[in-house]
Every structure is written in C-alpha cells, then in structure tokens.
Amino acid sequence: QVQLVESGGGVVQPGRSLRLSCAASGFTFSTYSMHWVRQAPGKGLEWVAVISSSGNDKFYTDSVKGRFTISRDNSKNTLYLQMNSLRAEDTAVYYCARQYCSDGSCIQRLPDYWGQGTLVTVSS
Amino acid sequence: QSALTQPASVSGSPGQSITISCTGTSSDIGGYNFVSWYQQHPGKAPKLMIYDVSDRPSGVSDRFSGSKSGNTASLTISGLQAEDEADYYCSSYTSSSTRVFGGGTKLTVL
C-alpha cells in the first residue's frame, strides 16, 4: 500500500534553514509527481510546491519562491523540501503527497495519497 | 494565487443531503477539469474524496458526488452520516501550473 512518511520538522529560529524529507513506499516513486502542502495551526490547507517525476519541472506558491526548494532522489524514493530564510508565517504541519494519474495522463493532476505530516515551528 | 472560495460552514441532519460550493476563476476551476475534494478529520491527514471534478476513488462511498458549472465546483453528500462530520477542501489545477486550495468548509452533522 502507498506510504508516505515525512521527517525533519522541529523548532527553528526565524531566518534559519530546515530540510524536510518524505520517504515513499508501496508504489513506483520515480513515475509520479509529488507535492508539498502545509497547514498552519487551526487554518486551512495551503499548496506549497510540486515536482515532476523526473525532477526537471518545479513550481511553487508565490510566498515561498526564492526561499524553498523542492527536490527528489528517485534512487532513494525520497522527496525533499529545503526551507531557507524561515519566517514565523511558515509555521505549519507540512504534508507530502503523491499526485494521481487518470485517463492515461499524470500531468496537471492533484494529490491523492498524503503522509501524516511533520510540524515545523518557526519561533525565537 | 488567491484561494478558492468556500463557505466557512454547512450543516445538516442525518439522512439529509448537503452541497458545498467552491468558486474560482477561469484560470483554475473554469479552465480545467482537474478539481479535487478532500475530507479532513481533526488531527488527521486529508483524504481524497473526488478527483477530476466528479470521479470517486475506489473505496469512497457513492454518497459523495462532485460537479462543476463554469467557475464553480460543488461537492454533494447525500444520506448524511455522523462520520461525515469533518472539514472539506476543494482544490484545482491553475493556468500557472500551480495548485490552489479552498479555504475549507466545516461540516456539522446535527
């Protein structure tokens, strides 16, 4: 069965960096695009970034452009999110999620399976 | 990248039907048939309930259905049950190749 396990969260000071990881299993990781989605405490879901199956195409929400970098290692079945210049407003549970395929295509789709999330708290 | 617009809350009694709307623009919902709905119980990860506007993943009850008209997508839950009480989020692909979520709707089963 599909499993996504995030790690790397914790408490970090404003302006510092953190790298999140997401270990995938139960499916052929290298053939799926992957997403990061976050949820601030008591708030709604916010899409953060997506990376194509090859890693060649990456897109970000405006608020993290230039600060966050999504990447993947298909040999290790692992997705990453490098977060630099962290701000208090980046405090959230960060979820990794797989993008589904339908009608023979895997592009332009949305997340289907989600991990349980890892909490990032940015505070001095 | 403005969030999609959902009502903050809806409610219904067991056995009734409710509909949650999700309004976007021609650059997201109105331009593509890539709209999904997610159910999230407190402290849990979101669960995909509807994809590609109206398709249900295997294992999701047929009490859940989705539709779209213009820039607005809708999720309908029929035969409301206590376990349906949760937060519901819509999401869409956008013309910028990004994705966008709605603000979420809290469903209360009376």
Image (cartoon, coloured by chain):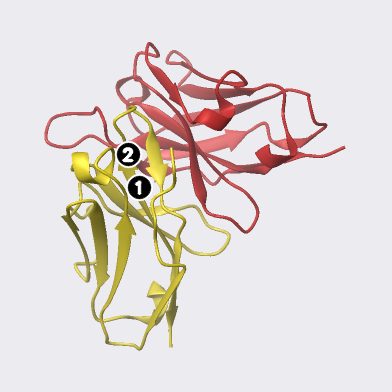
Chain colours: A red, B yellow
Relative to residue A83, is residue A13 drawn left or right?
right
Return the mark for residue A110: 2
Q: Position of residue A29 (x, y in %)?
A: 37, 24
Discs 1, 2 touching: Cβ within 8 Å: yes
Mark 1 to mark 2 CA distance (whole Å): 8 Å
Tell me the SS state at disc 1.
strand
Task: Name which residue lies at 32% across and 49% down.
Answer: B24
Specify the quadrant of the image occupied by residue B58.
Answer: bottom left
Are there few (<14), some (14-19), or many (20+) residues within 10 Å of tag 1?
many
Instruction: Please state the chain letter of the residue tagged with numbered disc 1 in the rendered image.
Output: B
Return the mark for residue B91: 1
* Residue A120 can be seen, yes or no: no
Return the mark for residue A117: none
Instruction: Please state the chain letter of the residue tagged with numbered disc 2 in the rendered image.
Output: A
Relative to residue B49, is residue B103 drawn left or right?
right
Q: Position of residue A101 (x, y in %)?
A: 23, 34
* Residue A71 can be seen, yes or no: yes
Relative to residue A76, is residue B59 drawn left or right?
left
Q: Position of residue B74 (x, y in %)?
A: 25, 62
Q: Quadrant of the C terminus of chain B?
A: bottom left
Q: Position of residue B35 (x, y in %)?
A: 26, 47
Task: Name which residue lies at 12% across and 36% down.
Answer: A103
Specify the quadrant of the image occupied by residue A118.
Answer: top right
Above or below: residue A76 compared with residue A105: above
Nearest to the eye among marks 1 and 2: give it.
1
Mark 1 belongs to which amino acid?
Ser
